[in-house]
Image (spheres, grey):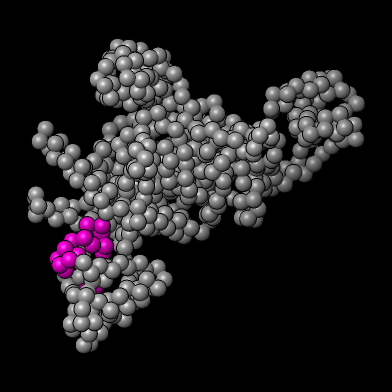
Amino acid sequence: MVEGHEAVERLERLTGMLRRRGVILPAFEIHGGAKGLYDFGPVGGRLRANVQNVWRDHWLSQGDVVEVSCPTVTPFAVLEASGHVAEFSDFMTVCQACNEASRADTMLEDHHPNPDALSMADLQALLDDVRPSCPSCGASEWSPIVAENLMFDTVIGAGSSGRPAFLRPETAQGMFTTYPAIYRHFRERLPFGAMQLGRGYRNEISPRQGMIRLREFNMAELEYFIDPESDVVPDLSAWSATSVQLVPADGEAFEGTIPKALADGIILHPTVAWFMARTYDLMMSLGVHATKLRFRQHARDEMAHYALDCWDVELHGSYGWVECVGIAHRGCYDLEAHERATGQRLRAWRTYPEPKIVEIDGWTIDGAKAGPAFRALAGQVKAKVETLAADTVFPASIVLDGGDEVTVESEHVKRVQRTESVAGEWFIPHVVEPAFGIDRIIWHLLDHAYEESGAGEEMYVRMRLHPDVAPVDAAVLPLFEKEGMGALASEIHRRLCATRGVLASYDGSGSIGRRYARADEIGVPCCLTVDHTSLEDGTVTWRDRDTGEQTRMSVDDAVQRLASR
């Protein structure tokens, strides 16, 4: 109990410091704030940008991944085709005493190992049986559970010409709808990937746990398009000695390597294994503690119906184990859904090792007559007619992908009988998707890096952030702001900030010890102190954040060291 109380107090001190130092703080606070919305302040904004840049550089270094940027406002038709309009919901119940809405599965987390996987009927039965207390007022009377769609709706255009739309709940759909352009960019050769960083919006029923569940959040997703029949296996030898925590859907958790888990059939696809290994490296380069990271495989009833395998990267911190990354083999679901809804071909070409001789005996449309008869639907009609058996009798009723039913008369078609040498075929690529919750990752970087020593007024805080994500690269501190030390420190500060890739801060207020403490508190990797000797020989004292060691060096060497970090 004491340990739990200490953990709560540590969390309060951490969040208080982040707010006070302008890292992460409640949004719109002067107007009373809004649940599920946070600001990245003057320190946090730089931290977030650095994390995003590390993420971006990591995946671009793979060589077959490009970055795109798509609108956040998304037409209704796009999210209807993807299934979000019908399925993107959480189960909600309302306290009958205080009218506070809550997620039903969240209310039942202490009473079921995985309430998120339960059906509405099973959740309702468990809610009726358990009758949990309302977190707001303590009452235990709940309304019937309903499915609440989480998307923010809006309109594209004004007045009666406006089209229904939503703020995107994910970045993925933009990459699926731009697939033809990406396919052309890669000279129509698989595999390749597209990635996107940006904002997502979900009108969460009950935002909680600070940065863990937000209504507007930063996310980063990568869609990697592959040929499902390719027998090319990525080289995982670089991770053959890297042990990670794995929690398979069946069996006990264990420590092992990703290549071995793939060979043993625990990881179900080599491309999924590749992205698990690459994601592990990314997490380490961001500064995540390896002992606080695990891969958890989704159970079959937990995965989307179209998913072939899915692993979450869970990070451990003040809120326990939290999903921060999902790596899913999504099959061909997304491209197929958009192809079906639009009639546009979202496919790739596969060349056969040897041409195939094919006997064709079937039907196609007579364009001169079918075109005027079916107009915009002519393309879909043609595709359907060409799948009909040779003994089909016309007129025939055909149901198109959009649900429209048309009657094809004998005058609209013509017989096709020929022998062809076929070099290949069109197919719908499969997709492996690593999806990252940037805000959740940032929270755990801060949680893992936060270190306290001492107690009470003597407590000292040091944020051991990785230098690549630290919000400030160096703090320039004049020992005194007189006798020319302040002027020299200001000149060094300006020089550092003008150096590409370097951001420095200047602090001349208070004792040098307090200024070191302020820099350590937000994770500045080093401080450059300007003193009397600096005025004589142009050197500064480099103080390392983590060791406290101090080294004398020239200003030129300090600038070069920071620039080449």
* Residue 384 drawn at (x, y percent): 75, 29
Relative vertical location of residue 157 with respect to residue 472 in this rendering, above or below: above
The number of numbered discs placed on residues in the rendered structure image is 0
Foreground of the two, 250 or 15:
15
The magenta region covers 510-529
Left or right of residue 5, residue 526 in this image: right
Q: Residue at x 65, y 53 (%)?
A: 184
For the point 27% across and 80% down, the residue is: 488
Dividing the picture into quadrants, the one containing residue 336 is top right
Residue at position x 69%, y 27% in the image? 402
* Residue 312 visible to an observer of this rendering: no
Above or below, comparing residue 205 to residue 141 in the picture: below
Residue 166 drawn above or below residue 131: below
Q: Which residue is at the front of the view, 258 or 394?
A: 394
**Which of the 4 image quarters holds residue 92?**
top left
Quarter of the image where the C terminus is located: bottom left
Q: In which quarter of the image is the N terminus?
A: top left
Residue 564 placement: quadrant: bottom left
